Image (cartoon, rainbow, N blue to C red):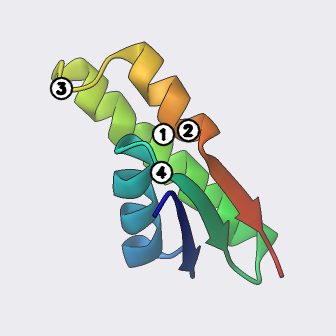
């Protein structure tokens, strides 16, 4: 298993996408609303920023994880 699809980008969906992307999986995050997808990516990035501040994640690991998340509306 290398690819994960998460349907819904709310609190639970973006958390699941965050964890899988951080663990090296390619993630497709699907939601009907482009605005919700944008908010989800912002939330994931902010959460990863906290991890970088706590030194549990490096900046390069954060960027690599964010690049593994693709968003889709259908």
Can you say whether 7 is above or below 22 in the image? below
Q: Position of residue 52 (x, y in %)?
A: 29, 22
Tell me which label, 1 or 2, sits earlier in the chain.
1
Q: Which residue is mark 4?
A: 25
Q: Which residue is mark 1?
A: 45
Residue contact between numbered discs 1 and 2, judged by CB atoms under 8 Å: yes
On the image, the x and y values in percent for residue 65 come to 49, 37
Name the mark nearer the viewer: 4 or 1.
Answer: 4
Closer-to-camera residue (10/56): 56
- Residue in front for this viewpoint, 36 or 17: 17
For marks 2 and 3, the one nearer the N-term is 3
Q: Residue visible at 45% across and 74% down?
A: 13
Frontmost of labels 1 and 3 is 3
Q: From mark 3 to mark 4, how far is it between C-alphas?
A: 18 Å
The span from disc 2 to disc 3 (Cα, nearest Å) is 16 Å
**Are the residues at dot 3 and dot 4 in contact (C-beta closer than 8 Å)?**
no
Q: Tell me the mark number nearer the camera, choosing from 1 and 2.
A: 2
- Spatial separation of the CA atoms under disc 4 and disc 1: 17 Å
On screen, residue 33 above or below 34:
below
Provide the residue designation for mark 3.
56
């Amino acid at each position: 298993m290398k690819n994960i699809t998460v349907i819904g980008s709310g609190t639970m969906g973006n958390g699941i996408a965050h964890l899988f992307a951080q663990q090296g999986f390619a993630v497709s995050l699907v939601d009907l609303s482009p605005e919700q997808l944008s908010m989800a990516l912002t939330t994931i990035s902010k959460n990863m920023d906290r991890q970088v501040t706590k030194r549990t994640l490096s900046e390069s690991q954060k960027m690599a994880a964010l690049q593994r998340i693709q968003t889709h509306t259908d």
